Image: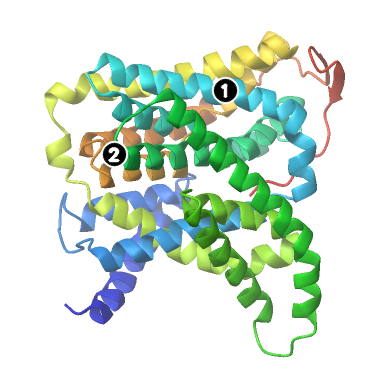
């Protein structure tokens, strides 16, 4: 088929299957993205094989995941993000390092090389709190001290996971995992992200005033997309993944254009095109080649490591900072779920031929198990006495329950 026909076919089949399965999964009170992944398995190489992923589909898919990250950035207020850095930064550092290390350890124990182990760590590092938020709302503990801490960590956890994936892509380009080069790449990605956020945040008010004077239709949306695409291109010139630029530009523009207004304009694009990304990534997986009896041990280790990583990281770090043991446990459990970033990390590794399809199936299993297990576990750990204030060590600051920061 010609590229034009592939485009129409991709949009029709991926959205039809994805949205239909999203609806079923959402009715079961699970993250809709699981429906996209199931749809991809059904129409892709594993079963029906009516959806072939070629270069055109991949281009559409990467636009989808990029616009999703742009939307995630717009969903986080710049001022709130900066105010979270002292406390949530320490918590995120501990939980992200522990979760990543557990994935890396699984890779080492099961015979993967250093680069493959790095990406297994990236798969387990990320957190997706959509299912946690829903569960906390149902039990009336979203605005609890622990609920606020979970949301704060989740904001920075997205950035941490994104930079880890960016570093991973650079490692693939370099051909080997070298500590010095990894450190340089990490600092470059972080520096490019920080510079882009700072500069674009300062320029954003001027951009807003220009757009306010324009009379053409959808000038706001056009300006947002220009900033999003330009940021992705600029960071790519510095050797950093465009995904970093997508998130950074969204965060920088969130207040200048108005948080609610900007999210409304971009949400539609994100919802549609991110569906194509998740459907197409799952469609590439041949589940039968990855579902081998000798890989059961690997899948089991990945699931166990997913839980232990957050318990060791988020739980232990929270406790060391001054949270009571029961609060630290609640925070750790709230950070169990994995979703979008785990899939992105797995897909990046498989597409780069660093890992086989078993890594993608492992990510799917981890996403499914952690999302199913978290709601009942939250009900258990949140039963009992409520903690209203904590005196933090190191920072020497008391925090109390307050309204939850905005986090999409």
82, 47: nearer the viewer: 82
Residue 61 is situated, as x and y percent measured from the top left of the image, at 37, 61
- Give the residue number, with chain letter if any, for mark 2: 360
Category of crowding for the residue at label 1, using alpha-carbon neighbours closer than 10 angstroms: few (below 14), some (14–19), many (at least 20): many
Q: In the figure, residue 380 lies in which quadrant?
A: top right
Q: Quadrant of the N terminus?
A: bottom left
Residue 184 is situated, as x and y percent measured from the top left of the image, at 50, 33
Secondary structure type for disc 2:
helix
Q: Residue at x 68, y 29 (%)?
A: 89
Cα separation between marks 2 and 1:
23 Å
- The disc, 2 or 1, on the residue closer to the chain's N-terminal end is 1
2, 202: nearer the viewer: 202
- Give the residue number, with chain letter if any, for mark 1: 95
Q: Residue at x 20, y 80 (%)?
A: 2
Q: Residue at x 53, y 31 (%)?
A: 375
Q: Image height check: is 330 above or below 359?
A: above
229, 96: nearer the viewer: 229
Can residue 98 be spotted in the picture? Answer: yes
Count of numbered circles in the view? 2
Category of crowding for the residue at label 2, using alpha-carbon neighbours closer than 10 angstroms: few (below 14), some (14–19), many (at least 20): many
Can residue 139 be spotted in the picture? Answer: no
Q: In the figure, residue 292 lies in which quadrant?
A: top left
Residue 107 is situated, as x and y percent measured from the top left of the image, at 30, 21
- Residue 34, numbered circle: none
Residue 59 is situated, as x and y percent measured from the top left of the image, at 35, 64
Secondary structure type for disc 1:
helix
Q: Image height check: is 6 above or below 196?
A: below
């Amino acid at each position: 088929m010609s590229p034009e026909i592939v485009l129409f076919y991709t949009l029709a089949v991926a959205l039809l299957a994805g949205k239909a399965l999203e609806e079923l999964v959402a009715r079961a009170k699970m993250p809709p993205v699981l429906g996209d992944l199931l749809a991809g398995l059904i129409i892709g190489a594993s079963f029906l094989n009516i959806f072939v992923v070629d270069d055109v589909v991949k281009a559409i898919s990467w636009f989808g995941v990029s616009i999703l990250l742009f939307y995630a950035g717009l969903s986080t207020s710049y001022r709130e993000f900066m105010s979270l850095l002292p406390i949530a930064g320490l918590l995120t550092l501990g939980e992200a390092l522990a979760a990543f290390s557990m994935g890396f350890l699984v890779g080492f124990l099961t015979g993967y090389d250093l680069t493959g182990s790095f990406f297994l760590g990236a798969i387990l590092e990320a957190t997706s709190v959509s299912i946690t938020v829903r569960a906390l709302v149902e039990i009336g503990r979203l605005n609890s001290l622990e609920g606020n801490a979970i949301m704060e960590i989740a904001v920075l956890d997205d950035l941490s996971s994104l930079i880890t994936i960016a570093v991973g892509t650079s490692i693939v380009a370099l051909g080997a995992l070298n500590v010095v080069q990894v450190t340089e790449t990490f600092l470059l990605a972080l520096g490019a992200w920080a510079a882009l956020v700072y500069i674009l945040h300062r320029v954003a008010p001027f951009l807003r005033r220009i757009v306010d004077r324009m009379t053409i239709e959808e000038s706001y949306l056009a300006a947002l997309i220009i900033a999003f695409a330009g940021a992705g291109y600029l960071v790519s010139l510095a050797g950093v993944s465009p995904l970093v630029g997508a998130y950074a530009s969204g965060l920088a523009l969130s207040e200048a254009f108005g948080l609610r207004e900007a999210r409304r304009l971009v949400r539609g694009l994100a919802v549609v095109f991110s569906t194509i990304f998740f459907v197409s990534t799952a469609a590439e997986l041949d589940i039968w080649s990855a579902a081998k009896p000798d890989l059961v041990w690997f899948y089991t280790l990945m699931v166990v490591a997913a839980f232990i990583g957050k318990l060791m990281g988020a739980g232990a770090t929270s406790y060391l900072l001054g949270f009571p043991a029961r609060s630290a446990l609640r925070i750790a459990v709230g950070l169990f779920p994995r979703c979008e970033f785990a899939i992105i990390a797995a897909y990046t590794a498989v597409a780069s031929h660093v890992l086989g399809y078993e890594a993608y199936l492992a990510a799917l299993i981890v996403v499914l198990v952690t999302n199913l297990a978290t709601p009942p576990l939250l009900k258990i750990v949140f039963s009992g006495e409520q903690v209203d204030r904590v005196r933090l060590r190191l920072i020497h600051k008391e925090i109390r329950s307050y309204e939850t920061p905005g986090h999409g």
